Amino acid sequence: MLDLKFIRDNVDLVKEGVARKYVDVDIDGILALDQKRRAIIAELEKLRSEKNRVSVGIARMKKQKEDASEAIASMKKVGQAIASHEKNLREVEADLQKLLLSVPNLPHADAPTGKDDNSNIELRSWGERPEFDFTPAPHWELGEKLGMFDLGRAARIAGSGFILYTGIGARLSRALINFMLDFHVSKHGYQEVSPPFLANRQTMTGTGQLPKMEEDMYQLSDETFFLIPTAEVPVTNIHAGEILKAEDLPRHYVAYTPCFRREAGAHGKDTRGLIRVHQFDKVEMVRIVEPEGSYDELEIITNHAEAILQALGLPYRVCELATGDLSFAAARCFDLEVWAAGVDKYLEVSSCSIYEDFQARRMNLRYRPAEGEKPIYPHTLNGSGLALPRTIIAIMENFQTAAGKIVVPEVLRPYLKGLEIIE
């Protein structure tokens, strides 16, 4: 959430940033409500002061046994006016809060301006795309032949856009989760956590999923809980509402969770196989840091996600997202896209984002830089490390053989009891 005072003092900057995200937000309406709110508060202060003055007078008259009925009637009218103004203030503040929650985070000045992913910029790449002396098969053909997953039965269980991993497919999925968690904990120093897979409305609002993306979320019928779309939601909210000490920062967390999203296949593309699904597994990194140097942290978390792809031997590229392709809450984002030979395209497996203090403000997470100093908001970052379905796709398609087998990446073999070939 943007600070209201910041919006008030930087109207043109805010309007420009919102426009760069190609979002329609009524900034003038926010300013008008803010002006109305401040006018009501000023009037309330006058009325409360008048009530106190009359109250003192009534007490004096009663002590002197004078007739205070007129003053009491006057104070009653003032009390009614106060109650009316307080009601108006609550309504205005609720409307103002609703509008403030609709304002996206402003994009960083260095983020490329553009309406969609066509304006994203490739920053670097790693690894060589595999070359075959045969036509590489897509993962859905390999998966069916090798008994790694059964999408037909998954559809009968839950509908299209869900995965039923079977046999070695299920084992490979579990191996990847364990490998990624172990890697981030032992090599990158993250603290592993295992959060709830449900989140309440306040928690979903804290990280920016609500109210903007409510239609993309799976909500329980009692409207109390949502299935989490990513571990970012519960993990970033671990310290919501707290005031941390300076020595409590930085906080580096990693977690595995399933992720649930309605938007799978919403655009009519990538609907075959595992590319776009409603439920998928993901290992997520979250960093809560002091504002100074937080953009260095963005490079660090991106490098941590890259290290997983490099360890698996999967070629990839890093792209910076254009302003119109950024998420609602992000100020800057680097996507990792892994090459998948069977479908002949790059597939996103990680988004590494910085939110500055946008999420911290929404969840009221602060820290005190030094004893006696005023609490301030830290910066938050997160990044997938990695999302599983597309990582599995890349392993299957890039490491396939002419005989339709799959070579297991060396780093995963200890997690699969030494298995070298899936056949």
Image (cartoon, grey):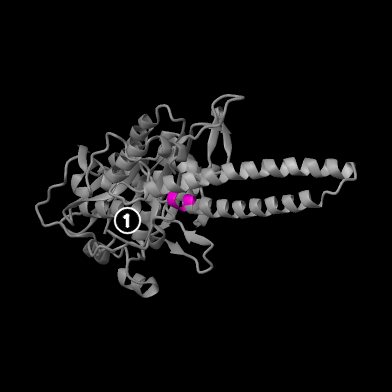
Q: Quadrant of residue 285?
A: top left
Is 217 in front, or is 130?
217
Q: Residue at x 28, y 45 (%)?
A: 19
The residue tagged 1 is 389
Residue 266 lies, in percent from the top left, at 29, 64
Q: Is residue 255 magenta?
A: no
- Seen in the picture, residue 249 relative to 236 is either above or below; the reply is above
Can the viewer see residue 2 in this picture? Answer: yes
Q: Quadrant of residue 280?
A: bottom left
Q: Residue at x 20, y 40 (%)?
A: 122
Say which amino acid is labelled 1: Pro
What is the span of residues highlighted in magenta in the rendered image?
96-100
Residue 239 lies, in percent from the top left, at 55, 42
Q: Residues within 10 Å of mark 1 (few under 14, many from 20)?
A: many
Q: Is residue 97 magenta?
A: yes
Is 167 in front, or is 104?
104
Is 226 in front, or is 259?
226
Q: Residue at x 69, y 42 (%)?
A: 50
Q: What secondary structure is the magenta-colored segment mainly? A: helix
Residue 183 lies, in percent from the top left, at 40, 40
Quadrant of the frame with the N terminus: top left
Quadrant of the frame with the C terminus: bottom left
- Seen in the picture, residue 204 relative to 266 is either above or below; the reply is above
For this orientation, the residue located farthest to the left is 133
Q: Secondary structure at mark 1?
A: helix
Q: Quadrant of residue 153?
A: bottom left
Can the viewer see residue 333 in this picture? Answer: no
Residue 158 lies, in percent from the top left, at 39, 71
Is 284 in front, or is 58?
58
